[in-house]
Image (spheres, rainbow, N blue to C red):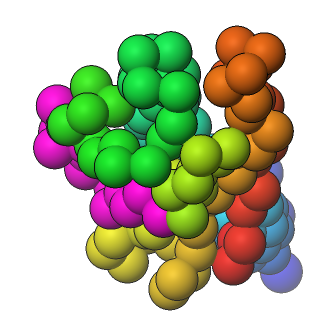
Amino acid sequence: MRHLRNQKGFTLVELMVVVIIVLVLAGIAVPVYMHYIQESKKSEAYATIDAVVSGGLVYFQKNNTYVGGTMANFMAADDVGNAQYFTYALSDLAATGFTVTATETGDWAPDGATVVWTHTGAAASSGDAGTGSFSESGW
C-alpha cells in the first residue's frame, strides 16, 4: 500500500459538507431577503396613504366634510398616479371620516393583500378633523 502524503485537494466528504452548509444558509437567507423586499415595497402604501390623509385634512378644513372628496381634491393624485406596487381607492366618504385602501398589484405579495387607513371622528362644529388607524390584511 502506498502512502499518499503529498496529495493535494479535497475529499468528496469535505465537498459534501461545504455544499450542505451553503444550502442551509441559502435556505435561511432567501426567505428573509424576500420578506425584506416585501416590507420595503409595502412602505409605498404607507407613504402614499399618508399623503392622501394629509390632503384629506386640508379638504376637511376648507369644506367641513369629507363628502365629495377625490384623490385630486385631497391633493394626492400625483402620489397615487406614480405608485408602482399598489392601487388606491377612497371609500366611505362621510361628514366624519373616510377610508383609503391600498391593494397590492403584481405577484410580489399575496393576492388581495391590502393596507387600509380608516379615518373617523371628525366634527366640523368643533373644528376637529378626526383621527384614524392603519390595518393590514392578507399578508
Quadrant including the N terminus: bottom right
Q: Where in the figure is residue 2, as x and y percent of width and height? A: 78, 72
Q: Residue at x 73, y 33 (%)?
A: 122
Q: Residue at x 49, y 41 (%)?
A: 66
Q: Where in the figure is residue 64, as x and y percent of width and height? A: 53, 27
Magenta span includes 85: yes
Q: Nearer the viewer, residue 107 or 76?
A: 76
In the drawing, does residue 41 fall left or right of residue 128? left
Q: Nearer the viewer, residue 56 or 114?
A: 56
**Residue 38 in view of the camera:** no
Q: Residue at x 34, y 31 (%)?
A: 74
Which residue occupies the extreme bottom position in the image?
Answer: 111
Indicate whether 28 appears above or below 98. below
Q: Residue at x 72, y 72 (%)?
A: 137
**Residue 96 in view of the camera:** yes
**Extent of the magenta region:** 77-91
In the drawing, does residue 78 fall left or right of residue 98? left
Q: Nearer the viewer, residue 26 or 35?
A: 35
Q: Nearer the viewer, residue 53 or 48?
A: 53
Number of numbered tags placed on the structure image: 0
